Image: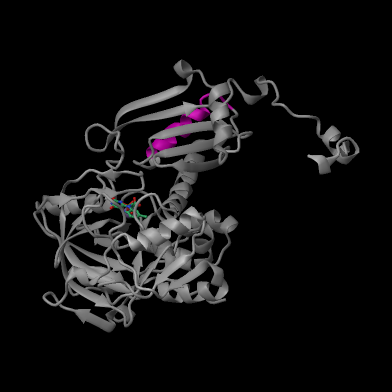
Amino acid sequence: MKRTKDLRGFLTEYERENPKEFCRIKREVDPEYEVAGILTKLEEMRKLPILFYEKVKGSSFPVVTNVCSTKKKIAASIGVDSKEFRAKYLAAIENQVSPKMVTDGPVLEETIGEDDFDLKDLPLMTYHEGDAAPYLTAGIVLGKDPETGQVNASFNRLMYQSRNKAGIFMTVGKHLHEMYSRMEDQGKPFPISISIGNHPAWALGALYIGPYGDNELGIIGGLLDSPVEMIEGELPGTVFPADAEIVLEAVIEPYVREEEGPFCEFSGYATGKGLRPVVTVKSVHLRKNAIFQDICGGQHREHLVMATIPMEANFYRTIKGAVPTLVDIHVPAPFTLIISIKKRFPGQAQSAILAAFSCDVYVKHVIVVDEDVQITNLQEVVWAVATRVQADRDMVIIPGVRGSSLDPSCGEEGVVTKMGIDATAKPSLSAFPRRNKVPQEVLDRLQLEKYVNLDNL
Ligand SMILES: Cc1cc2nc3c(=O)[nH]c(=O)nc-3n(C[C@H](O)[C@H](O)[C@H](O)COP(=O)(O)O)c2cc1C
Ligand SMILES: [Mn+2]
């Protein structure tokens, strides 16, 4: 089957093949709380369909949300199933396909100039009590390094401020912030594009974690098995995807700071407001009948699932470099990583912990267990910590390290204490008495119905 490269193509395919996971909502909804409210009620019922809101109060755009709410949807978008997904992601990192510059594309069907738009025309969302203003969360921000011209892609929340201005949150140490700082050092405005409504592979690229300078557009091309088509903006220094639904060309001025936040975040908290840079939008490009994509802020499945996939792939790659017998990894909560290893030598749990800290600023707590522990079963992980840890011997504590400023427990903004727990058996698993296990031969032999009347139980 030929795979499509844009959002609307993916939506059409997914709706056709999985009609039960696609829900069209015809009744008008309010972007203030109602879009998030319907999603929340469905999540409580463990339902995660793609939600297509045809009529959104105050806006002419339909809104789609929950596009990446399950691994199945994201995997389907690149033609694999959930089990093959990590291998495909790692292969795309190794086998990148460089982007192709084009001069025209669907997103140029309509253009609105500097004086003729109002960000309020977009269905910006208020999700939760505590959000400071309407927000745009699903915009992929593309910026270029001033020296190399290397393009970076990331999601950055944008807070409505006025007709053409929005506050932007850029984590210190992440690449967009670094690029902005390099431009600010030269006293120059930083040109960016913000693209809304992209094929899911774009989310996987924007959320890729790797060294500064890695080419996220090449990874997206690798995931799609074809180059992404990019257009140079009218604003010098901007580029954007030819088949996005909506694109904003914008600059982030140097030295300007305005209040941004609070906003209910993936950490589960409305994290504090701060003085942050400001985006000034210069023009808007859009497709005919453009679809506005939304990703519900806060602790909802879509944000957690889509962010976790690239994070796990990155952890897997880096930790395997330190411990070849890495078995698996799992991100069960914000800032938290569980690793299982087949430990051959003492010290390998500590190697895994240090490798994990080295790959991502967000990770704060790491627990390492042996391969006999099911890491997705938190009860088993806690059992390993209970029975295989002595705190004075098995903790690695590193204070004063950069973490996430969205962690409400951190002291100075974004500075945290990192903690690793070596919950592997010492010196090795073989030194520990076997876990309760009735011999398999006995389990195979016993026919329960011969001993117990199962109908009475
Ligand atoms: C919906 C969504 C919203 C996000 N918002 C922000 C944000 O406001 N600021 C930020 O620094 N990272 C945000 N992120 C995370 C970054 O996009 C992610 O860390 C990315 O890998 C950074 O790119 P980089 O490694 O190229 O710097 C968000 C992620 C998602 C899924
Ligand atoms: Mn990057």
Residue in the foreground of this view, choosing between 28 and 131? 28
Would residue 277 appear left or right of 58 to someone viewing this image? left
Q: Is residue 447 magenta?
A: no
Residue range of the region highlighted in magenta in the rendering: 345-358
In the image, is 251 to the left or to the right of 127?
left
- The answer to which image quadrant residue 39 occupies is bottom left
Of residues 62 and 372, the one drawn nearer to the viewer in this rendering: 62
Q: Quadrant of ligand 2?
A: bottom left
Q: Nearer the viewer, residue 170 or 87?
A: 170
Residue positioned 35% across, 41% down in the render:
362
Q: Residue at x 34, y 69 (%)?
A: 29
Task: Provide residue 324's location: percent of width, then percent of height.
Answer: 55, 38
- Residue extending farthest right: 450
Residue drawn 72% across and 26% down? 436
Q: Is residue 346 magenta?
A: yes
Residue 203, horizontal then vertical, whole percent: 39, 61
**In the rendered view, how is the structure colored?**
one colour
Q: Is residue 365 above or below residue 216?
A: above
In the rendered image, the quadrant that contains the C terminus is top right
Q: Mostly what secondary structure, the magenta segment?
A: helix
User: Residue 25, relative to residue 295: is it above or below?
Assistant: below
